[in-house]
Amino acid sequence: MKESLDLLIQLYEYLTKQIVQITRRVVALCREKKYHERIKLLCTAPGIGKLTAIELLVELQDMARFKSTSQLASYIGLTPAEYSTGEKTRKGRITRCGNKRVRTYLVESTWILITKDPWIRAKYLKLKAIRGGKRAVVAIARRFIIRLRRMLLDNVPYNATCALAA
């Protein structure tokens, strides 16, 4: 019993040291000239912190490589699947074929965005009444990544009044 407790304590200490090292690496990466300005820009958006910002920048790289917003949403996996036969078209769940980590961070950030931005909250509540809460969050997350793309391309901070226009 004591040996297993000692083993668990050693494992805890090892994992704590690993977390500290990784955190230092992320902070150092955030300070690099390549990412620093864009991270500051992304952190102006509610729900986006340094970790989420660096994840977006590292995984998505240059936003200009996405020719359209639908390409970006598709890359992340936030587009609905479509089942078409003849004249009938049915939209299904999101494809989930994109980057799972970016999608996860984005949806988590969207929950915070909904509480902080009144325009987005109104849109969320409207969608929630029609489609349900989870689908509404995914729809808002899609709008959010499009807005973040526009922020990075135009080099402007987040502005709540024009969030719905994106």
Image: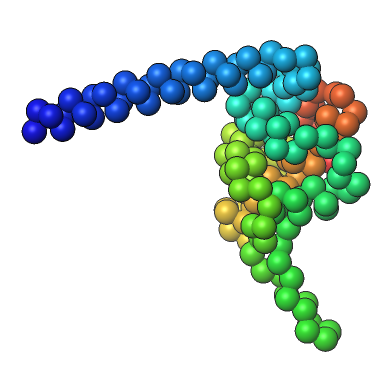
Q: Position of residue 31 (x, y in %)?
A: 69, 13
Side of 160 relative to 131 (left or right): right
Residue 91 in view, yes or no: yes
Q: Residue at x 73, y 31 (%)?
A: 57
In the rendered image, the quadrant that contains the C terminus is top right
Q: Position of residue 143 (x, y in %)?
A: 76, 45
Residue 130 in view, yes or no: no
Q: Residue at x 68, y 52 (%)?
A: 98
Q: Residue at x 89, y 48 (%)?
A: 68
Q: Position of residue 128 (x, y in %)?
A: 62, 54
User: Which image quadrant for residue 38?
Assistant: top right
Q: Residue at x 71, y 49 (%)?
A: 76
Colouring? rainbow
Judge by depth and name the residue closer to the eye, 43 or 102: 102
Judge by depth and name the residue closer to the eye, 48 or 13: 13
In this view, 28 is above or below 15:
above
User: Which image quadrant for residue 80?
Assistant: bottom right
Q: Position of residue 50 (x, y in %)?
A: 63, 23
Q: Can you name the residue that lies furthest to the left here?
A: 1
In the rendered image, the quadrant that contains the N terminus is top left
In this view, 136 is above or below 115:
below
Side of 135 relative to 62 (left or right): left
Q: Can you name the residue that lies furthest to the bottom here?
A: 86
Judge by depth and name the residue closer to the eye, 88 or 28: 28
In this view, 119 is above or below 36:
below
